């Protein structure tokens, strides 16, 4: 079953920025676009584990801070298909509060 | 006897439902309406023109007393329902009126949201929802002069405009970076802000209201950042919430709003609900169009037609500020498979953006020219496939046969007096005239005749545009100028010149006026634009942190494992026991794994976690140390040797010279990193001849060297000139830095820049022309005033950007 965990509100994340949530098993980057959309990816770049949360967010993408590979926030896919895919984490917004579901995707992936 | 229908709420949705019912089934019910407001039914939307003085109350009445009488409706005005007795099927008003029902319709609308801040209930604080609120505002405008509106959404801006029209000084305080961010994207928000500012309305974005101050009545507002705005009237327009108190108290299912099914029926089958107070399929609405759709379904339901169902609505918005044309509809966020068609015509102040997905319009934002809003909206609602008209879609319905926007319009729109070539002070008019008068046809000829683009060359693209504009197809030249990034056709040089010529002072302004082809840029152009604006508008431009790379945002260097390195400044490579002790203590206290002496004569602490950074800095600050900017496109190090202070060969005091240079230049942002060195004699132990600015002491003074680089491609410096005094070293150093700051492209170090513009150009600006040198020096020193604040101290103890170092908390695990 999906377990949603509240992690904060939209204003906790800067526009075109990201914040990190640490669970027991992984770090999750929660992003906010200019249009106040919220996305979450595992905070680990498929290239060399760069913390995606620290990259520059533009449109619906983020550029990894280590070697500048670009990933789509919604699908986790690399803008350049050779760059692989970052793991997505389910997010939902309820009245401006952000909920993520780390368990679900993790189990699915394991 | 006819069944009895009672309606709670004499507003737009409730009465529309009654109107619909009367057309469908004129005599089906005995109708009784309760309204809390002491008025007949009026058009709430028109409160804005009412406030602005463009309409009177009579103009905005929808149904006057006659309408109720003619249709046999009993109207109780000023009668608020306090209680619904669902057992007895009866409603009771505050003043004791009772009415029994067979069917009940709840149409209580919304309540304005009141920010829970101190002073929110002082007299002089009003909301913007009904006629009474407008009367209060009009009364205040007659006797008072200053108003603050909290909220830069539709309501807030219409209130601000109305108050301004009544002669008040108005400031808008808005939490988000751009206005109406729910309906508009950044670009349109920027245009709107500019227009409202032109009308004399002060706009404060990113402004969080902390408190409304005043003893007996509101006297002003205090913002989170400490700014105070005095005001006699404070309008709260921060949003609305569905009015559910009554329904909740009566035990109906409510979440955000009163929950209804597709037939607009609540959890009690005898009770329907309509308007802003309802929640349908999880959505609540704040505009009339969906409410009118709902009203039709309510009427059908009451007329026993169970086939009608409400499916939810797509909405569109227009701002009712006379003279501002603005339209927004649908979803305009980017997503997988979405494409943008953008048209920016800065000259006419037009911005249009269509978001497409699978060849269908998904969202539209129009500013300045909204004539086609309805057309786009219709196609959006119908989900029409636009493949065949895609080419000309953005030009609007009237446009037949795929024309082309002129890509040169930004240059065409410049006035004749706009300076094109900054080096030689040549304006647009002069170039255009020269092309015409002398039959010039190539860049080289323009250079020879006018000197434009003959120096640093950063305006080459603009000059070529002018050639093209003036000669049309006759111009065949055109060098391959590389665009800054895929978001624009303009080169770095063009963008820099246009920022100055058009006085663009924010990233959205640049993107709008220079017709950027993406919505909010990319990771290549945003840092570049941010630097250009920081450099060009010192003290005026507010640095955009989200447009900086992580190192500059975190003021530390990110490492391969996601930890950071911290390098404190050691002025001129000089240190002492107090600093070393502070470093040692920090290393122990925070368990820092690696301590290394850098190639830049200072100490690097590697492996610090991001959350630890502010505490590490705080301790280093306490030991007297500040940020070394080892992470920045900024002044890095000034290496020195021991010089005449100690060395048996030293000819000048290179150590103190280096310290003076570093104290003058630290904190400065530059196109790429800048490194300096001072050697005490030509043996050059500080390796000054591979630095951006290198100084070598000789018996008679100082040799100044520029454009060196020790990195990927080693380049030895060029000799700029020789000077005699320390003061001269400092003046030339600052002038050189400033010229580099103004002319180089972002991420171009001094070595390639000097090669591009030529050493002669640099010599002419910095050495030969003393007045120019003095100007550059003054400009540099002026900029320094705004940046020589230790970024570490600001973050460790002064509360700047502390959010950067916080994680999001897990609320429950
Ligand atoms: C720490 C240090 C190496 C050391 O352990 O000594 C260092 C470390 C890095 N250098 Fe360097 N450089 C260091 C001195 C140098 C020097 C020597 C000097 O300054 O005298 C050079 C050659 C001189 C020059 O720049 O002309 C140097 C040429 C580079 C280059 C190539 C620059 C070029 O123009 O070709 C890069 C890459 C870049 O900037 O794009 C670079 C980039 C880097 C980065 C920032 C790589 C990165 O982007 O993460 C490294 C950061 C590590 C960190 O977190 O501290 N580093 N780097 C030195 C820090 C000096 C300081 O106190 O600030
Ligand atoms: C200044 C302003 C400008 C606007 N501009 C636009 C616009 O340009 N375009 C657009 O689409 N929309 C606009 N709107 C929004 C639009 O007016 C509303 O969506 C619409 O009025 C909602 O209709 P409603 O019937 O649900 O609520 P209302 O019109 O608010 O009617 C609800 C009525 O119920 C009464 N009531 C509440 N509780 C009780 C009770 N217990 N007993 C008796 N009566 C009660 C209230 O007093 C009120 O009169 C604007 C709103 C405002 C305030
Ligand atoms: S030379 Fe500089 S950039 Fe290369 S590994 Fe060493 S520190 Fe890193
Ligand atoms: S680790 Fe992300 S691009 Fe290399």
Image (spheres, coloured by chain):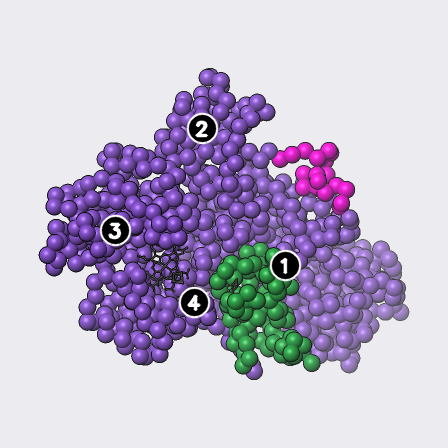
Chain colours: A green, B purple
Residue at mark 1: A81
Q: B145 or B649, which lies in front? A: B649
Secondary element at image label 2: helix
Rounded to the nearest whole Å, what is the CA distance between mark 1 and mark 3?
45 Å
Mark 1 or 2, closer to the camera = 1
Whether the residue carrying mark 4 lies under 8 Å from ligand 1 is answered with yes
The residue range painted magenta reads B386-405
Is there one chain holding both mark 4 and mark 2? yes
Q: CA distance from mark 4 to mark 2?
A: 48 Å
Q: Which chain is home to disc 1?
A: A
Residue corresponding to mark 3: B688
Element type where label 1 sits in the image: helix
Instruction: Decide if residue B194 is in sight here.
Output: no
Residue at which label 2 appears: B428
Q: Nearer the viewer, mark 2 or mark 3?
A: 3
Q: Nearer the viewer, mark 1 or mark 3?
A: 3
The reply to whether discs 1 and 4 touch (Cβ–Cβ < 8 Å) is no
- Crowding at dot 2, Cα within 10 Å, few <14 / some 14-19 / many 20+, comes out as many
């Amino acid at each position: 079953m999906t377990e949603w965990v509240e992690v904060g509100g939209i204003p906790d994340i800067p526009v075109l920025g990201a914040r990190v949530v640490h669970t027991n098993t992984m770090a999750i980057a929660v992003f906010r676009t200019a249009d106040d959309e919220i996305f979450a990816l595992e905070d680990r770049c498929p290239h060399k584990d760069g913390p995606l949360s620290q990259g520059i967010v533009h449109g619906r993408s983020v550029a990894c801070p280590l070697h500048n590979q670009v990933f789509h926030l919604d699908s986790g896919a690399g803008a350049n298909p050779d760059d692989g895919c970052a793991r997505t984490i389910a997010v939902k917004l309820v009245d401006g509060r952000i909920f993520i579901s780390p368990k679900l995707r993790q189990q699915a992936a394991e | 006897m006819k069944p009895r229908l009672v309606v709670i709420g004499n507003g737009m949705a409730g009465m529309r439902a009654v109107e619909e019912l009367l057309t469908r089934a004129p005599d089906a019910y005995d109708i009784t309406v309760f309204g809390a407001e002491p008025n007949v039914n009026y058009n709430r939307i028109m409160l804005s023109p009412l406030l602005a003085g463009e309409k009177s109350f009579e103009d905005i009445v929808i149904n006057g007393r006659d309408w109720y009488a003619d249709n046999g409706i009993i109207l109780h005005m000023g009668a608020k329902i306090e209680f619904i007795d669902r057992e007895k099927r009866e409603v009771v008003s505050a003043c004791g009126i009772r009415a029994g029902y067979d069917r009940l319709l709840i149409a209580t609308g919304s309540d304005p949201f009141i920010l829970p801040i101190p002073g929110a209930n002082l007299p002089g604080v009003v909301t913007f929802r009904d006629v009474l609120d407008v009367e209060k505002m009009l009364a205040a405008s007659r006797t008072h002069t200053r108003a603050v509106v909290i909220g830069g959404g539709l309501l807030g801006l219409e209130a601000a405009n109305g108050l301004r029209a009544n002669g008040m000084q108005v400031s808008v305080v808005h939490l988000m970076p751009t206005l109406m961010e729910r309906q508009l994207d950044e670009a349109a928000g920027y245009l709107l802000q500019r227009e409202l500012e032109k009308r004399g309305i002060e706009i404060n974005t990113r402004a969080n209201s902390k408190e409304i101050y005043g003893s007996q009545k509101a006297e002003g507002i205090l913002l989170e950042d400490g700014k105070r705005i005095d005001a006699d009237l404070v309008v709260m327009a921060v949003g609305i919430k569905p009015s559910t108190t009554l329904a909740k108290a009566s035990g109906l299912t409510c979440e955000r709003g009163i929950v209804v099914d597709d037939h607009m029926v609540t959890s009690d089958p005898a009770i329907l609900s309509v308007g802003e107070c309802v929640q349908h399929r999880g959505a609540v609405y704040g505009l009339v169009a969906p409410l009118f759709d709902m009203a039709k379904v309510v009427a059908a339901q009451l007329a026993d037609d169970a086939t009608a169902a409400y499916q939810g609505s797509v909405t569109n918005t227009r701002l009712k500020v006379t003279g501002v044309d603005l339209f927004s509809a649908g979803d305009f966020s980017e997503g997988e498979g979405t494409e943008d068609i953008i048209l920016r015509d800065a000259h006419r102040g037009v911005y249009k953006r269509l978001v497409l997905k699978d060849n269908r319009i998904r969202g539209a934002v129009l500013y300045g020219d909204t004539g086609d809003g309805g057309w786009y909206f219709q196609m959006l609602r119908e989900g029409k496939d636009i493949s065949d008209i895609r080419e000309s879609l953005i030009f609007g319905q009237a446009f037949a046969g795929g024309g082309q926007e002129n890509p040169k319009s930004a240059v065409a729109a410049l006035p004749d007096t706009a300076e094109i070539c900054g080096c030689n002070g040549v304006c647009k008019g002069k170039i255009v005239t020269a092309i015409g008068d002398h039959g010039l046809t190539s860049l080289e000829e323009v250079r020879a005749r006018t000197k434009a683009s003959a120096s640093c060359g950063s305006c080459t693209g603009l000059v070529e545009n002018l050639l093209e504009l003036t000669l049309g197809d006759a111009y065949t030249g055109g060098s391959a100028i590389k665009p800054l990034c895929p978001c624009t056709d303009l080169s770095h040089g063009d963008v820099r010149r246009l920022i100055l010529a058009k006085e663009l002072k924010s990233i959205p302004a640049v993107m709008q006026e220079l017709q950027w082809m993406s919505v909010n840029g990319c990771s290549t152009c945003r840092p570049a634009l941010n630097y250009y604006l920081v450099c060009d508008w010192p003290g005026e431009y507010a640095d955009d942190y989200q447009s900086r790379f992580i190192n500059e945002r975190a003021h530390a260097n990110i490492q391969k494992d996601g930890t950071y390195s911290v390098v404190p400044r050691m002025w001129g490579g000089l240190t002492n026991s107090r600093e070393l002790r502070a470093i040692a203590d920090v290393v122990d206290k925070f368990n820092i794994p690696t301590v290394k002496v850098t190639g830049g004569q200072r100490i690097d602490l590697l492996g610090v976690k991001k959350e630890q950074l502010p505490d590490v800095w705080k301790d280093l600050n306490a030991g007297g140390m500040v940020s070394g900017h080892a992470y920045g496109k900024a002044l890095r190090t000034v290496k020195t040797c021991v010089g005449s202070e100690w060395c048996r060969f030293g000819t000048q005091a290179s150590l103190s010279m280096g310290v003076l240079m570093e104290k003058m230049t630290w904190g400065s942002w530059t196109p790429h990193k800048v490194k300096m060195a001072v050697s005490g004699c030509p043996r050059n132990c500080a390796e000054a001849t591979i630095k951006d600015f290198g100084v070598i002491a000789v018996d008679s003074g100082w040799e100044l060297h520029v454009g060196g680089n020790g990195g990927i491609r080693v380049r030895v410096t060029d000799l700029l000139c020789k000077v005699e005094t320390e003061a001269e070293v400092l003046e030339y150093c600052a002038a050189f830095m400033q010229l580099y700051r103004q002319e180089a492209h972002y991420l171009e170090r001094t070595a390639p820049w000097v090669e591009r513009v030529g050493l002669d150009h640099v010599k002419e600006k910095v050495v030969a022309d003393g007045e120019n040198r003095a100007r550059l020096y003054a400009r540099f020193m002026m900029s320094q005033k705004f940046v020589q604040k230790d970024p570490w101290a600001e973050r460790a103890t002064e509360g700047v950007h502390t959010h950067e170092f916080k994680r999001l908390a897990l609320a429950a695990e």
